[in-house]
Image (tube, rainbow, N blue to C red):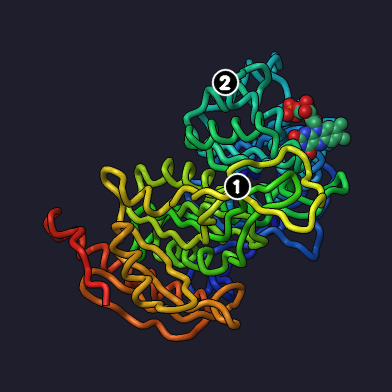
Amino acid sequence: MCDLNRRSIAANSGHLTGNAWAQNEPYTQLECWYATGRLPLPAAAPIILHMSAQPRKIILGVTGGIAAYKSPDLVRRLIEHGADVQVVMSRGAQQFVTPLTFQAVSGKPVRTDLWDEAAEAAMGHIELARWADEIVIAPATAEFMARLAYGFADDLLSTLCLASSAPITIAPAMNRQMWANAATQANVKLLRERGIRLLGPESGEQACGEVGVGRMVEPARIAEEIFTPRGGAGVLSGLKVVVTAGPTRERIDPVRFISNRSSGKMGFAVAQAAREAGAEVILISGPVQICTPLGIERIEVESAEQMLNAAQKQVADADIFVAAAAVSDYRCCEISSEKIKKTSDTMALSLSRAPDVLATIGRSESPPFLVGFAAETENVERNALTKLNGKNLDMIAANKVGDGLGFDKDDNALTVYWRDGKKELSLTSKIALARQLVELIAERYRLRKQEPKALRKSAVNVG
Ligand SMILES: Cc1cc2nc3c(=O)[nH]c(=O)nc-3n(C[C@H](O)[C@H](O)[C@H](O)COP(=O)(O)O)c2cc1C
């Protein structure tokens, strides 16, 4: 339950309609009034407090980016989910929004200073670090991420992050160049490796007028992510599933690249279906314009090499790897540092093989259960089985592409092959198809677990 010391409450109890009704969840709807001035919250948006015996205690760190104007809304949404929220602001954040705003929406004085004598006398920084069940930083600036990555403790928020054992989730927000900068990306990598969860950033229009990756994930969604269990009941419960999706891009020069028509829809659908089936899901995606399904961590990559690096890192402790990305087969032998000029009527690009993500994972010492995709324009079965064998896969999902089939469509059909069997999954929406595929993966995964090791990778007939 949120801290109601500062609020008087008019409450009425009952049962919710909709989802909560269906689940027969008890609830109490509370209308909160601020003790000082009895300011009602906007009537159109009553706070629904989901009552629980133990409220989730969340430190919401706000750092100095333009997206800080959205953070009061996040406080409100976390409280709606039943959280007890303590806001901690960096110095930069106070340039954008005042602590008073956060005090009003959270019902608690905001903490801003490590050197606050009164606060240290009462709930000092170590107590606050111990108090938190979870630390959420939204927005997280490039600067704050750098300080977090390097273990700085030069303000209250960074000190809390170091001193707390609570899980940390950050929602970065910044100009797209700042996000793409090698220094920021190196920090992102470090933070991920240390188990810090990143939500976003998303792609879209930015406050600076540019368009690209760097927008903070919307508050409603951050709150939902925080309260969505990362794994649950279902056929993949307790398993970690890594999914690749979308195309890759191989650069030619600063403005051109080689890519393909993959939209990422199938891979995203598989990730969503695996998540629904209870798995912890990591989605490694090439450049696509699709929102990340709830409860899934998305890692964005561009080239085949980046996809391979991310996949190798993620599969180390994964149970299942589903490679739905359309990875470029070839890349330029040399990437021009300047835009190539049209100086002659013809030009030839010299290409070499790009890394084969799936085959490389298949050759590793103890690969997870491997599922590949084969998008073929002809000889679908033969090519799929060749790939199943050649890449040491456990399953392959094959489909015909071209002539309006497969890429960038909302519907698809698949034939799934494994060592001694196959199954047709007929034309339906990609999410319905993905759910069927996930059922099949779970079934084959369990059977493989029961097989003696020697039997696991014997060849299939290429018909
Ligand atoms: C108007 C303005 C907007 C800014 N927006 C962002 C932003 O969206 N993301 C970011 O990483 N930094 C942004 N900055 C830079 C940060 O405010 C700056 O790096 C600051 O030192 C961050 O400190 P903090 O992380 O401790 O709050 C902005 C700066 C200004 C002046």
Crowdedness near tag 2: few (<14), some (14–19) or many (≥20) residues, C-alpha within 10 Å: few
Q: Is any part of residue 102 visible from this angle?
A: no
Crowdedness near tag 1: few (<14), some (14–19) or many (≥20) residues, C-alpha within 10 Å: some
Q: Quadrant of residue 393?
A: bottom left
> For mark 2, what is the residue?
151
Q: Is 368 or 1 nearer to us in this picture? A: 368
Q: Which mark is residue 55?
A: none
Q: Quadrant of residue 85?
A: top right
Q: How many marks?
A: 2
Disc 1, ligand 1: is the CB inside 8 Å? no
> How far across and how far down the image is residue 272, in percent?
50, 64
Give yes or no for contact between labels 2 and 1 (Cβ–Cβ under 8 Å): no
Residue at image point 61% right, 18% down: 152
Ligand 1 rendered quadrant: top right
Task: Identify which amino acid the numbered label 1 is placed on.
Answer: Cys
- Please tell me whether residue 319 is drawn above or below residue 196 in the rendered image: below
Q: Is 252 or 113 nearer to us in this picture? A: 252
| Element on which disc 2 rests | loop
Q: Is 269 or 160 nearer to us in this picture? A: 269
Task: Identify which amino acid the numbered label 2 is placed on.
Answer: Gly
Q: Is residue 260 left or right of residue 307?
A: right
The earlier-in-sequence mark between 2 and 1 is 2
Furthest-right residue in this view: 209
> How far across and how far down the image is residue 216, in percent?
71, 47
Can you tell which of label 2 and label 1 is closer to the viewer? 1
Residue at image point 26% right, 67% down: 444
Residue at image point 54% right, 23% down: 162
- Please tell me whether residue 6 is drawn above or below residue 151 in the rendered image: below
* Quadrant holding the C terminus: bottom left
| Element on which disc 1 rests | strand
Q: Is 457 or 179 nearer to us in this picture? A: 457
Measured Cα–Cα span from mark 2 to mark 1: 39 Å
